[in-house]
Amino acid sequence: MFYDKSEKYLQESPPIEALNLQSYEEVIGHKKLEKLKQLAAPLENKVWAHVNSTYIGGGVAEMLKSLVPLAKGFGIDAQWHLFEAHSEDFFYITKKFHDLIQGVEQPFSVEELHGVYIDNSIKNFENYSVTADLTVVHDPQPCATSVFGNYEGPKLWRCHIDTTSANKLIWNFLLPFINHYDGAIFTDERFVKQGVKKPVYRVAPSIDPLSPKNRQLSEQEARQILAPLFNKHNIDGDRPIVLAVSRYDIHKNQATIIKAFKEIKNDKEVQNKKPILIIVGNTASDDPDGLAMYGQIMEDRENDTDIFLLMNIENNDENIGALMRIANQFVHISTKEGFGLVVTEALWQGTPVIGSNVGGIPQQVIDNETGFLVEPFEIDQIKQKMKYLLLHPDESKHIGKQAMEHVRENFLLPSLLEKYLLLMRHYTGVDSNHPHFKIG
Ligand code: UDP
């Protein structure tokens, strides 16, 4: 459950140790590390606060868990404040917001907006304040705290969601709160909607190359990690693997992956390669849609023994990294996607991605270079790319290498930190100009 009655008030996360930067030098190189040190030097001991609504689970928490210690490693006083639910309704309502912002229509009431959502913001700050040289508030859950919270110092709102088809009423409801920040950060230009009157920055999320999931593995290491999982599910890991990993969710479009795979595996040329499809997914215990979706996908599978649907796997992080390492291809054809960290993770393990041309995916999947871009329901296009990669494993590896470099250059945690350092420098007056990634 998101809601934990023992944690009712905004609070600081458990203490977080500074990271030893030496380990990063091996991944990003001496030059980049020195550049970061230079940028960070005038920010020493400055307070950089984050506010978000969960310490465990979800992409934002994953990122903060790595970003905060990394910033501390550079001498910045990075803090993480947790925004808590005061009633069980709160996260159900913000999940609704999340869906409405992603274009899934459903009814909502004034009581939900004002009675629960706003009330929760007020209660979180009843006996609390956040004083920082820069505060970053993540996602819609604590968005209204720009007005109802107690902040001292400049603050930015960071939106991690694909807002292209956001429900107009919800967006207009959020706008005054967004405009009460000193700026807003979006993952993609296309997500910025009309009415935002403060500076807007484009910042992509990133992955931590040193986390157990993203540690780069040799093929042998990966196979060793996977042996118990493959045994348990009777998977022949020597067969070419078409892999998909995501929550079981309507937007993740797993049904189309299954459909395309079923058709392609019987293709004359593909048949003797004997590919298998592995779909790994998880669902939060308080997300009834997830379980229903898993049931639906199970039905779509129709007892096809070349398709493995795994749910909440053990040793999750290491197994996912290892699967991504040995897969022939990774397929991620969501219909909506804020960024798609799974895509980053797969590319980083050197596996080409067949990705849909939506949300943040095209920043990562460069057509013919790091993978292939397709339309989410264009089944012939998807089949064609699946077939190509299955028939050309060497080309798949070549594309995978380019994919890895694309991530190294753009989507590793130090690149994200660099952008935040530039923002901190601007908002603390070290640099008068806005950083180069200001887009509005
Ligand atoms: N994930 C996982 N186990 C699963 C399914 C997903 O660890 O069974 C992770 C995945 O590796 C990624 C995150 O959950 O780090 C999903 O982030 P993404 O941005 O792709 O999608 P979201 O779930 O935020 O829409």
Image: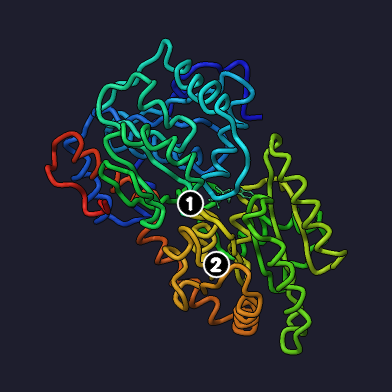
Report if the CB atoms under discs 1 and 2 are less than 8 Å apart. no
Residue found 77% across the figure and 74% down from its top: 262
Residue 430 is left or right of residue 191, and the answer is left
Amino acid tagged 2: Gly
Please tell me whether residue 299 is drawn above or below residue 116 in the rendered image.
Answer: below
Q: Which mark is residue 109?
A: none
Toward the top, the furthest residue is: 127
Nearer to me, 273 or 253: 253
Nearer to me, 332 or 211: 332
Residue 338, position in %: x, y? 49, 52
Amino acid tagged 1: Asp
Please tell me whether residue 383 is drawn above or below residue 413 in the rendered image.
Answer: below
Depth-wise, is mark 1 or mark 2 nearer the camera? 1
The residue that label 2 is drawn on is: 355
Element type at mark 1? loop
Residue 185 is left or right of residue 308, and the answer is left
Residue 388 is left or right of residue 59, and the answer is right
Residue found 60% across the figure and 70% down from its top: 329
Q: Residues within 10 Å of mark 2 (few under 14, many from 20)?
A: many
Element type at mark 2? strand
Residue 142, position in %: x, y? 45, 29
Residue found 49% across the figure and 75% down from its top: 399
Residue 370, position in %: x, y? 47, 72
Q: Which mark is residue 162?
A: 1
Q: Quadrant location of residue 250?
A: bottom right
Nearer to me, 135 or 221: 135
Q: Mark yes or no: residue 412 visible.
A: no
Q: Would you say the beta carbon of the disc 1 residue lies within 8 angstroms of ligand 1?
A: no
Of mark 1 and mark 2, the one earlier in the sequence is 1
